[in-house]
Amino acid sequence: MLRLRAGTVHPVTAPPISDGAVLVDGGRIVAVGPASRILSPAGAGNLEFPEAELVPGLVNCHTHLELTHLAGRNGEPDFARWIRRVRELKDETPAPEFRRAAEAGIRDGWSRGVTTFADTGSTGAPLEAMAALDARGIYYQEVFGPDPAQCDAGLADMDQALARLRPLASAPLRRLGVSPHAPYTVSAPLYRAVALRARAAELPIAVHLAESREETEFVRDGTGPFAEALARRGIEVAAQRRSPVQYLLQLGVIRRGTLCIHCVQVDQADVASLALAGAAVAHCPRSNAAHGHGSAPLASLRGAGVRVGLGTDSAASVGDVELRAEAAQAGLAGADALRMLTLEGARALDWDEEIGSIEAGKAADLAVFPAGGWAGAARGPALLTVLAGRVVHRGEAAAPHK
């Protein structure tokens, strides 16, 4: 049993509590309220932070943990060439390095108050790292295959990867999904086949969607750098005469439970379609800015009822997994920023019944920051991070109260 006391406790679903406390037992929150009412049972551990703020653990809705080691190693300004360079760097990476990179990314996130990761990757290393560290997260196994003639081979690769990884996705901390990567790397037949397979197996889907202008040009007109790259490989590209969102809706990819990553290049019709389908969006404002894509219409998405969470994308894009900086980049502050970093992120992942707020009965995923340190572009580490009642990061100030 553990009792945490802080100058302010932010339940998110209730008003802040001055001089508040949270009692944790068996990995779950059993009580929250004013410290004077939340007494410490005999034998309980006690941690007190009178000048700090206690918040729910932060939820990172989009990462590429296996690329943590590539921070600062790809300065290519053109997006299509940047992606090719990432593939080259991955090809040059020894297999064990992906696991080390993913573990480093998880620990870095913990030090910044993140307790949940929604990761997409091709190597399986992020889920292996989550299992080794007993971390909370969902791992979406990426699927590639732009050549329609190779659809069966792409499905076979996916099935093989899922069979290997499924034992690591143990509830309640870990989940497994699939990620047909993006319109310029996945053929229409493969999209349809993955969507059908995922629905039959009740696997969630994540897809990079409407991220760049080059992607829109590829889907709508069948032209641009992505089309040219496929043409050099002898793969025919057809103009779809519709937006990337409408294209994936047509293919049956976007539905309830689909996490649409980025969604920068969308119009009001796309936003309405995402809301009607019950899809969620992972908004990655720093990555979008770094690659010159623009900014997703966050207010429109939220106004339409689309569930939106924040993500850091890869360290190769933004250099770190500082989720609080994403809130600042998105222009969020105060209680709205905290809600996006926690409960709204949990809702985007369909995990809000378990995490995202400080309520009795929920998992004890918690973070303690210096006053104001959970908001804006603050870069200081968390004073304490607790995952399912287990301390996974402890700063120097987090000493037991005597």
Image (cartoon, rainbow, N blue to C red):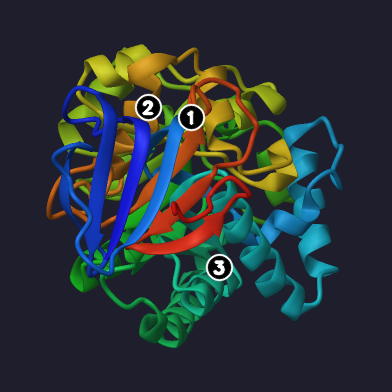
Write the residue at 30% across / 29% down: 19
Which sits earlier in the primary sequence, circle 1 or circle 2? 2
Whether residue 344 is visible to the viewer of this picture, yes or no, is yes
Location of the C terminus by quadrant is bottom left
At label 2, which amino acid type do we have? Answer: Leu
Q: Secondary structure at mark 1?
A: loop
Residue 288, percent from left and from top: 61, 27
305 horizontally vs 113: left or right: left
At label 3, which amino acid type do we have? Answer: Pro
- Residues at marks 1 and 2 touching, judged by CB atoms closer than 8 Å: yes
Q: Is disc 1 surrounded by few (<14), some (14 to 19) or many (20+) residues within 10 Å?
A: many
Residue 175, percent from left and from top: 34, 67
Q: Is disc 2 surrounded by few (<14), some (14 to 19) or many (20+) residues within 10 Å?
A: many
Q: Nearer the viewer, mark 3 or mark 1?
A: 1
Residue where numbered disc 1 is placed: 374
User: Alpha carbon of mark 3 to alpha carbon of mark 2: how far?
Assistant: 26 Å
Residue where numbered disc 3 is placed: 126
Which sits earlier in the primary sequence, circle 3 or circle 2? 3
Write the residue at 37% across / 36% down: 6
Residue where numbered disc 2 is placed: 338
Q: Nearer the viewer, residue 173 or 11?
A: 11
Q: Quadrant of residue 226?
A: top right
At label 1, which amino acid type do we have? Answer: Trp
Q: Quadrant of residue 341?
A: top left
Which sits earlier in the primary sequence, circle 3 or circle 1? 3
User: Alpha carbon of mark 3 to alpha carbon of mark 1: how far?
Assistant: 25 Å
Q: Nearer the viewer, residue 321 or 148?
A: 321
Compared to 163, does 344 lie above or below?
A: above
Write the residue at 34% across / 65% down: 193
